[in-house]
Amino acid sequence: MNHRLADEMEKPLPLQLESLPFSRDVLCTFPSVGSILRVTVETGNEKLGLHLLDSGKWVKFINIICQVRSDLWHGVMKPFTKLRILPNEDNIILQRQRFYDERISTKWDRMPLSSFDWPSRITETDYEHVPFVTLMDVLTYPEVTAKFKCVVRVVTMLPWRVEDFRSPLGIYRMRLTLEDPTARIHALIYAEDGEKFFGGYPSVDVMTRKRNELLGVAERDYGTEIENRNPPWVQCCIKSYYLVKSDIWGSRHYRIFGTSLVG
């Protein structure tokens, strides 16, 4: 990752590439496992015939360009890009659909494939035998308040200096940006959940080491500007809640609980 932690206050890492987030109704049409790739169309590509496509159809992209924006992969359709509509009986489609059905039907296969055979051991949760779900499962869950266990990467945090993790009164209050192949969300660490997460109130040196392990900072980068990070896949528990009773979905937030950073 190239996003600088020091930039998170002024230039926060976006949760999506679109200017506005998708509604929950739209998100519910997305697959709950697998990588979700946003694709944009450059102006002047009207000949691609996108107006002929129906939602839910299988399409093969030929000569699509993949780029990284805000540390997220996205596809760009160029004038030389071609589309091919595939029938549901195509062998590739049948194979992909079978693999998807197998993943969503098993207890542990909602983990990102790149985290197999198991995520990093630097975190532990209080709910060892609870199966994992994806962040898309979290976003589209039919109830506002719920509890989940996910495998995610912590791609940034605010504040990022360990000296600022707690308020002047000594209370933990932080915002982590979590991602998996399906989505990104903000999740708070607050008060007693922070004590649980960090194992009480360790020294600045211990906190710095734990933070760097969580964010994927290489040891050679200690004491220097933090960049080109590779955050590990970790497991954590997330609970959703609302702030405004008259707008429960619009005020929905997420918080980490029951999770310890033991690395």
Image: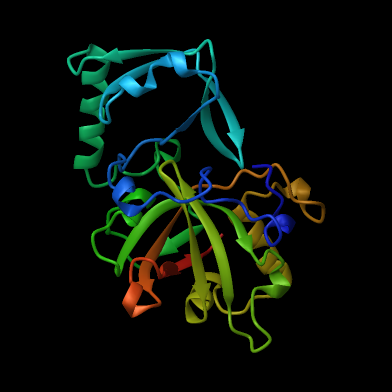
105 versus 185 height, above or below:
above
Query: Quadrant of the rendered structure where residue 243 is?
Result: bottom left
| Residue 186: image location, x then y, percent | 50, 60
Query: Quadrant of the rendered structure where residue 143 is?
Result: bottom left
Q: Residue at x 41, y 36 (%)?
A: 36
Is 149 placed left or right of 185 in the picture? left
Q: Residue at x 34, y 56 (%)?
A: 138
Residue 149 can be seen in this image: yes
76 versus 90 height, above or below:
below
The front one of 250 and 230 is 250
Q: Residue at x 65, y 73 (%)?
A: 165
The quarter in which the N terminus is drawn is top right
| Residue at the farthest bottom position | 169
| Residue 152: image location, x then y, percent | 46, 51
| Residue 49: image location, x then y, percent | 38, 16
Q: Residue at x 54, y 57 (%)?
A: 177
The quarter in which the C terminus is drawn is bottom right
Is 73 placed left or right of 249 in the picture? right
The front one of 169 and 11 is 11
The front one of 166 and 17 is 17
Residue 134 can be seen in this image: no
* Color style of the picture: rainbow
